[in-house]
Image: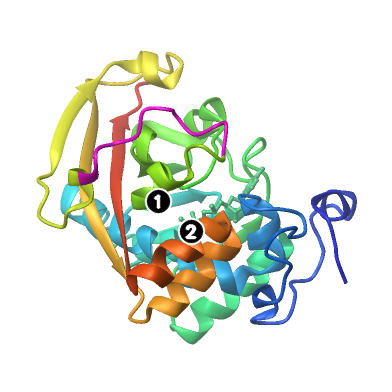
Amino acid sequence: MNLTQEDIIRSGYKLQAAPVDAWRIYNENDPIPGYFEFDWLSSRHPDLYHQFALSTVGLMEKLHALIDLTGCDVIDIGAGTGRSAAGAAKKANRVFAVELYTSVVSFGINQLQQNKTKNVFYINGDREHLPVPENSVDVAINAWAELNLEEAYRVLRPRGYLILLGAIPNALCGELTSELVSDYAWLPKECAPAEVFEPEYPDACFTADNSIWNGIRVAGPIHIHEFTYVADYQDYSIVADMTGRLYGPKAKHYFMTRRQSTFSWRLQIIKGQVSK
Ligand SMILES: C[S@@+](CC[C@H](N)C(=O)[O-])C[C@H]1O[C@@H](n2cnc3c(N)ncnc32)[C@H](O)[C@@H]1O
């Protein structure tokens, strides 16, 4: 059945996922509903998103080097299939994983059961109205997802940490960014230089003020940590298939011709403490 994003919205975000591996069958030149439709792809094919999302594993490993989550109550906003929540749960007391699509929630709960993770609690909910009380969590994380900053601020305790995790702005598609820039108008025209994707490229740290977070009140500066992470998929045909479905035929061609099984990212973690 060819469901569109509109069908999913009409259902109240409550449609079932397609069978595992169903994402492999599509018309390369005219996929339904298209490429870069990450919400549609992850809600219909959470197995695809989960397999692909190794960059989140890298982000969470780095996060543990930057902050000690021991004993913290964490909310993961836009939790997806649980990569970010499970990463936080290695140290945190409890993680509340908020995700809009019920198909993704079901997939994530299943993953957590398989991994015997007991301190992640999925909540089917919307980032615009977070389903937890104000001043109730120590840390809010937001990995590869959009965010309502005011809502995140509302649920954080005074001095709680707000943490955004993803790619640097001029490398949103990792090492593929310069390949794809002419195809997708929303990609910044100036791409990060190729050298930042080399595994040994050094980390970089900056600080910013709260203007980057629309002025929500913070205690002290906001810290930005950039680093390079190489996701290893072991088999080049796997990364070619997945990126082909997510980004389009150019991406598939890139990995097939190079016979490359790794995908390099320049990632960033933005971390600040809210003041109330
Ligand atoms: C790109 S995924 C990131 C998942 C996870 N944080 C990770 O890094 O692997 C973004 C997730 O946000 C979810 N999402 C989209 N709109 C949302 C909303 N309004 N409220 C909560 N989650 C939402 C999507 O369904 C998707 O699973």
Is residue 187 in sight in this rendering? yes
In the image, residue 263 sits, relative to residue 228, either above or below, namely: below
Mark 2 or mark 1: name the one nearer the start of the chain.
Answer: 1
Q: Report the amino acid beneath label 1.
A: Leu
Asked which quadrant contains residue 42, the reply is bottom right
Residue at image position (79%, 55%) is 13
Tell me the quarter of the image containing the N terminus: bottom right
- Frontmost residue, 136 versus 109: 109
Q: Quadrant of the C terminus?
A: top left
Residues in magenta, as a range: 184-194
Residue receiving disc 1: 176
Measured as percent of width and height from the top left, residue 151 is found at 56, 31
Badge 1 element: helix
Q: Nearer the viewer, residue 87 or 254?
A: 254
Q: Quick one: 194 or 89, which is closer to the camera?
A: 194
* Magenta part, dominant SS: loop
In the displayed structure, 66 sits above or below 56; it is above
Identify which amino acid the numbered label 2 is placed on: Ala
- The quadrant in which residue 99 appears is bottom right
Which label number is shown at residue 251?
Answer: 2
